[in-house]
Amino acid sequence: MTASSLRLLIADDHAVVRAGLRALLEGEADLEVIAESADPQEAVRLTVALSPDVVLMDLRFEGAARGSGVADGVEAVRALAAEAPGVPVVMLTSFSGRVDVVRALEAGARGYVLKAGLPEDLFRAVRSAAVGGVGLASEVVGGLVGQRDDPGAHLTSREREVVRLMADGHSNRSIAGSLYLSEATVKTHLVRIYRKLGVDNRAAAVSEAVRRGLLELT
């Protein structure tokens, strides 16, 4: 591994899946698995203790303790948003239903990838999440766009550019530089985008823009 390797934590209740993911991920020169967990609550504790660059989180965990506050992947994402807000989480699951995807993204997940998908989708999502972007598998994007509501308030062309750059992992400063705007203007655009889309964070803004068909991720 190199000094710039991304440090990953895998949370999945199946040992075979974890072993396969470790082998797959560590086949990439810039990815390193530093810990594994079979339990969502333990995954939260390990993340707080180890501060990985990205957490790969399963959606559902068999046998996870109810009443603990962290019984599945979405609850773990929500807990991490409070306890380790600087660590992005990518959901890696077999479930592609719109409700599952929306729950995960609204909780704060920075990506959603299917276990049956291509390895390149996983690598792309991990690397995008690590730099502040949002990584969604093409099947997930298709499912969101295919279930559009009335878009209601629309995004202006400039606001779409801002969302596109957010999806690519750009900071406010980087967006400002790319669009020749001040950071204050970018922040104003973000306030308007959040209000129009009914969201309160960057990942949710990107996923909602995709769901409404206002933005396409490639």
Image (cartoon, rainbow, N blue to C red):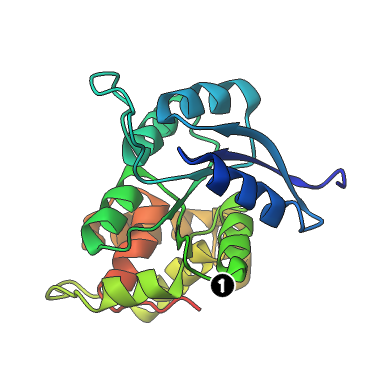
Observer able to see residue 188: no
Is residue 128 something that shows in the picture?
yes
Q: Residue at the location (57% across, 62% down)?
A: 122
Residue at the image point whose x is 29% and y is 64% from the top: 208
Q: Is 167 on the left or on the right of 152, as rendered?
A: right
Relative depth, front residue between 86 and 17: 17
The image shows residue 78, relative to residue 129, as above or below, that is above
Quarter assignment of residue 66: top left
Name above or below for residue 22 compared with residue 64.
below
Q: Nearer the viewer, residue 216 or 188?
A: 216
Outermost residue to the right? 2
Q: Residue furthest front?
A: 16
Q: Secondary structure at mark 1?
A: helix
- Given the image, on which type of amino acid does mark 1 rest? Leu
Residue for point 29% across, 73% down = 143
Q: How far across and how far down the image is residue 166, in percent? A: 50, 62
Left or right? Give the position of 26 relative to 122: right
Q: Residues within 10 Å of mark 1 (few under 14, many from 20)?
A: few
Where residue 179 sits: x, y (%)?
Answer: 56, 72
Residue that carries the numbered disc 1 in the rendered image: 179
Q: Which picture quadrant has residue 140?
A: bottom left
How many discs appear? Answer: 1
Foreground: 88 or 61?
A: 61
Could you tell whether 155 is left or right of 8 in the image?
left
Q: Please provide percent x and percent y for residue 51.
A: 62, 29
| Image location of residue 38, percent across then percent down | 49, 32
